[in-house]
Amino acid sequence: MTSRASTTGARVAAILAGSWREPVEGWTGSAGEAHSVTPLLLHGGVAALAWRRLRGSEAARGVAAAELQQAHRLQSLRAVLHERAVGRSFALLRAHGVEPILGKGWAAARLYPDPGLRPYGDVDLYVRADQYAPARAAALSPEADCPIDLHAGLAELDDRSPDEIEARAVRASADGVPVRLFAPEDHL
């Protein structure tokens, strides 16, 4: 690794360090240091985390920080839309007689202090293998207005019974719709 790459990686790591924790420690580095890695933060999907760390600092006044702030705003808006998509997806599959479990995406984002800090693109729904056909029909229907990543079976959890996994499932509400998520020990 070159010295420049090492410095760049260290700056990215320094900006992101603890940015998902509550409370977040403010950035004490310079605006120039933040500016030098802003393109990497923007393209790496971590701009909102970087903004959370920089927002109360001297570096927050720079042009690069404004780009990070805009990225955070966009991800926050997308988080609201994704939550609605999760609720609609559950309602759609239930209308077709299928009871899914949600993994990844929104399930992980809701654990952050601000759901806009964790970007994701689709709704990962897991269904029992015998419910896959009606679930797939629902996901491919014109009523499905968001990207659903449908999984037959319960991922890498073959060492556990589906009944155990479903019994441990965590209940939550996505845009007012009751949803089921993998329990923390299953979601890992």
Image (cartoon, rainbow, N blue to C red):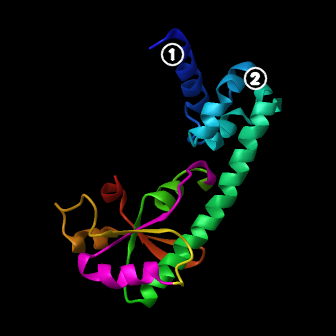
Residue 6: which disc? 1
Q: Is residue 178 magenta?
A: no
- The magenta stretch spans which residues? 116-141
The residue that appears at 74% across and 19% down in the rendered structure is 32
Q: Residue at x 53, y 84 (%)?
A: 142
- 130 inside magenta stretch: yes
Amino acid carrying label 2: it is Ala
Picture quarter containing residue 155? bottom left
Residue 82: which quarter of the image?
bottom right
As drawn, the label of residue 31 is: 2
Residue drawn 46% across the image and 74% down it: 179
Image height of 72 relative to 14, above or below: below
Picture coordinates of residue 171, whole percent (x, y): 44, 72
**Front position in the image: 162 or 11:** 11
Q: In the rendered view, does 48 fall on the left or right side of 121?
A: right
Residue closer to the observer: 162 or 183: 162
Mark 2 nearby-residue class (10 Å; few <14, some 14–19, many ≥20): some
